[in-house]
Image (tube, helix red, strand yellow):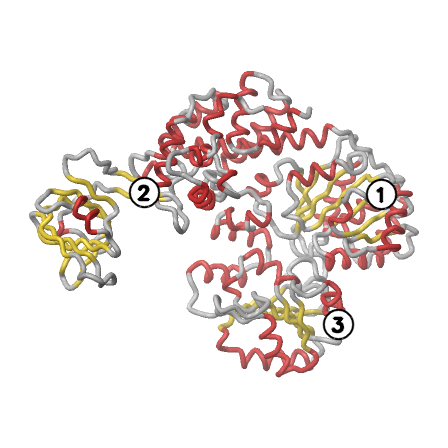
């Protein structure tokens, strides 16, 4: 149950005067909530303004600069309504102060309202953006107007909040004011030493300062009130992860203790030696699985760093110990590829593998399910179908989940229900900056593969304007004649009137005119068997130029593909460009990547393309991406399940994240059920930041 003290913070915003379901939905959109029904007072309280309007600047009409926000004390001289029936003509009000004259301009305004707001002969305070036309001063739709000496509100410092089409600033401000009025005095959940060391105000004072900043210094993310709220948000996130970690690890894992025989056989069959990083990761994973405490580990490795072989060694160790391991991939293309690779490496091992996806049907499916249940299948590879209710495991010891930013806390808990609490290894080939690893995977231990396997050659990366297409075609013709394989990436599947980008389908037709039947096409809207055929044709060499959308971004492995062309590279994020580039350079040939752009380039796009030319280090790319775009956009928090923060900013508050992680682990160690006085206050913190899942975990024991 939520503590009664928090009830005022969880009233629906539709209970406020003037906010019906329609306005509530608009507010929800501005707050990034699902719907108006789901939006509460607490969401308004924690909405930070993104800028400030300072209305203290009063230069007088003659001294106001173009585009400046100014406040003027004006004498109203004359109203000039548009002629009847001419609604496209603006309504003008002429006024003056001691320095000069100005026209206040309004479009589609009601005469009676303006006459009331700006009465003839009266002194009026007006604030807005200044404009000059042919030496004459003008202000279009002033933001604020009030008669001098009246009781009309005229805020001198005004916070500005994010809006959405159809939502007026005044209505949003009114809703925020109503929520703030109801904010109760809450017990302190932060420790006294931390508060003293950082000079943090209380939660209530911090919220008050957030919405009533005195000047621009209060908007600084390092201002004490902002840092306090950022720390609250980070601690709530880290505490919920620590509680999940505690819950997952409370279920005793089965120690995986094989005799090493099958592993030795696998190592002998490998056509390469493991890198130092791979050996260290294998040692860490096997040590974790040897314990009765469940493993919960993130294996981070750049594109082509050899994560799959590390996971396979762990899976083989489970078979040695008389158990089973599963490898779950996000797409059928990637699952198929893993299956083919693993079957090849285990050819003479005697280990039986099974393959299960949503497309496995009928007799074949029944056969696979039987082998999983009776233990004949030692290693099972597939998609999320592996964890549906009708899949029963004989003795599941390890779950490996590949390439899943989308694999969040809830899914980790769901997996726990399968088998007798399997060990868990989550892999990602999208290098994630350390701060984001802590915030999204704070409940996990981390292994990082930073070297490329021996023999991998660097990828030469060049940026070229789309105007040089004829030159690129000549290069590609020579490459195809020399038997090389090429990817050509487009950002869209089909043409759009809204965005002037070359679609994959249109580019395919155009390239086919030049290169004929060696041109292939693959995109996300194709049926699964069509995609399989397109990939097979490319692998076999039937096609040599594959036009694709980002469907090939993750995990597609064609070792002899050595050229990558990315069209409209300026439209892609850094991490995505890096992932795409990683599809080449996987074989013995020297590889190249051409980033085609359409100018002129903005500063961020220029910086992105420059970083791609400078480095192949995915971890550096990820850090630069975080710097350029901020964590909210980095992996697309909505789509990826990565945390999007309201008040915390990982590039500014990285020091607080480290403290929050340590604090959360200490809290859970000292007070695992949050039953102390501070624990009760921390439960409120979890509710306030909508970490109800963590509170339910506590109730479930």
Q: Earlier in the sequence, mark 3 or mark 1?
A: 1
- Per the image, the residue denoted by label 2 is 52
Q: Residue furthest top?
A: 677
Q: Is residue 330 above or below residue 11?
A: below
Please state, as top left, top right, bottom left or bottom right, where the N terminus lies in the image.
top right
Q: For this rendering, which residue is in front, 608 or 71?
A: 71
Whether the residues at callouts 2 and 1 have beta carbons within 8 Å, the answer is no
Q: Quadrant of residue 697?
A: top right
Check the picture and name the quadrant holding the C terminus: top right
Mark 3 lies on residue: 537
Tell whether label 2 touches label 3 (CB within 8 Å). Answer: no
Residue marked by disc 1: 324
Residue at image coords 72%, 66%: 531
Q: Position of residue 253 (x, y in %)?
A: 79, 32
Quadrant in the rendering for residue 680? top right
Question: Which residue is at the front of the view, 192 or 393?
Answer: 393
- In 3D space, how far apart are the residues under numbered discs 2 and 1 (Cα atoms)? 58 Å
Q: Residue at x 24, y 44 (%)?
A: 144
Tag in front: 2 or 1: 2
Q: Position of residue 379 (x, y in %)?
A: 84, 48
């Amino acid at each position: 149950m939520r503590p009664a003290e928090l009830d005022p913070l969880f009233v629906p915003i539709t209970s406020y005067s003037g906010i019906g379901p329609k306005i509530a939905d608009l507010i929800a959109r501005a707050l990034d909530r699902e719907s108006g029904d789901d939006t509460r007072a607490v969401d308004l309280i924690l909405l930070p303004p993104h800028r400030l309007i300072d209305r203290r600047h009063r230069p007088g009409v003659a001294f106001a600069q173009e585009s400046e926000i100014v406040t003027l004390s004006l004498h109203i001289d004359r109203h000039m309504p548009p002629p009847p029936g001419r609604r496209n003509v603006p309504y003008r009000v002429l006024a003056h102060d001691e320095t000069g004259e100005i026209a206040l301009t309004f479009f589609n305004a009601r005469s009676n309202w303006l006459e009331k707001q700006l009465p003839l002969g009266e002194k009026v305070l007006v604030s807005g953006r200044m404009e000059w036309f042919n030496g004459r001063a003008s202000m279009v739709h002033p933001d604020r107007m009030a008669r001098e000496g009246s009781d009309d509100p005229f805020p001198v410092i005004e916070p500005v909040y994010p809006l959405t089409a159809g939502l007026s600033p005044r209505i949003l401000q009114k809703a925020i004011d109503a929520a703030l009025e109801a904010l109760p005095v809450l017990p302190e959940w932060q420790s006294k030493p931390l508060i003293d060391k950082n000079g943090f105000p209380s939660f209530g004072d911090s919220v008050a300062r957030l919405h009533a900043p005195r000047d621009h210094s209060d908007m600084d993310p390092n201002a004490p009130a902002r840092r306090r709220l950022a720390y609250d948000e980070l601690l709530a996130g880290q505490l919920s992860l620590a509680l999940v970690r505690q819950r997952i690890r409370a279920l005793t894992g089965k120690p995986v203790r094989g005799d090493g025989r099958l592993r030795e056989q696998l190592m002998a069959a490998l056509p390469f030696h493991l890198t130092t990083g791979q050996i260290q990761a294998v040692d860490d994973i096997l040590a974790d699985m040897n314990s009765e405490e469940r493993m919960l580990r993130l294996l981070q490795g750049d594109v082509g760093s050899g994560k799959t072989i590390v996971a396979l060694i762990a899976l083989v160790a489970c078979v040695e110990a008389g158990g089973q391991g599963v490898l779950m991939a996000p797409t059928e293309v990637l699952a198929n590829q893993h299956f083919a690779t693993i079957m090849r490496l285990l050819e003479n091992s005697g280990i039986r593998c099974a393959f299960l996806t949503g497309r496995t049907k009928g007799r074949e499916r029944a056969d696979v399910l039987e082998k999983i249940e009776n233990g004949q299948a030692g290693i099972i590879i597939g998609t999320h179908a592996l964890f549906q209710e009708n899949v029963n495991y004989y003795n599941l010891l390890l779950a490996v989940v590949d390439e899943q930013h989308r694999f969040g806390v809830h899914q980790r808990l769901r997996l726990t229900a399968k088998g007798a609490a399997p060990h868990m290894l989550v892999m990602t080939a999208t290098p994630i900056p350390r701060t984001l690893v802590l915030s999204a995977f704070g409940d996990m231990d981390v292994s990082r593969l930073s070297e490329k396997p021996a023999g991998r050659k660097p990828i030469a990366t060049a940026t070229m304007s789309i105007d040089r297409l004829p030159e690129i075609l000549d290069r590609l013709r020579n490459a195809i004649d020399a038997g090389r394989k090429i990817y050509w990436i487009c950002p869209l599947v089909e043409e759009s009137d809204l965005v002037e980008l070359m679609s994959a389908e249109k580019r395919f037709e155009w390239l086919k005119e030049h290169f004929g039947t060696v041109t292939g096409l693959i995109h996300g809207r194709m049926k699964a068997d069509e995609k399989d055929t397109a990939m097979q044709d490319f692998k076999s060499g039937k096609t040599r130029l594959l036009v694709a959308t980002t469907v090939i971004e993750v995990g597609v492995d064609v070792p002899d593909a050595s050229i990558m062309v990315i069209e409209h590279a300026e439209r892609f994020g850094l991490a995505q460009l890096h992932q795409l580039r990683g599809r080449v350079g996987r074989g013995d040939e020297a590889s190249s990547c051409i980033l085609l752009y359409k100018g002129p380039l903005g500063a961020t796009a220029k910086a992105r393309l420059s970083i791609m030319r400078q480095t192949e280090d995915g971890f550096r790319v990820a850090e630069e991406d975080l710097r350029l775009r901020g964590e909210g956009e980095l992996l697309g928090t909505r789509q990826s399940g990565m945390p999007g923060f309201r008040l915390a900013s990982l590039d500014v508050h990285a020091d607080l994240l480290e403290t929050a992680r340590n604090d959360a682990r200490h809290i859970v160690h000292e007070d695992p059920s949050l039953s102390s006085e501070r624990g009760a206050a921390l439960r409120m913190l979890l509710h306030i930041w909508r970490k109800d899942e963590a509170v339910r975990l506590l109730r479930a024991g």
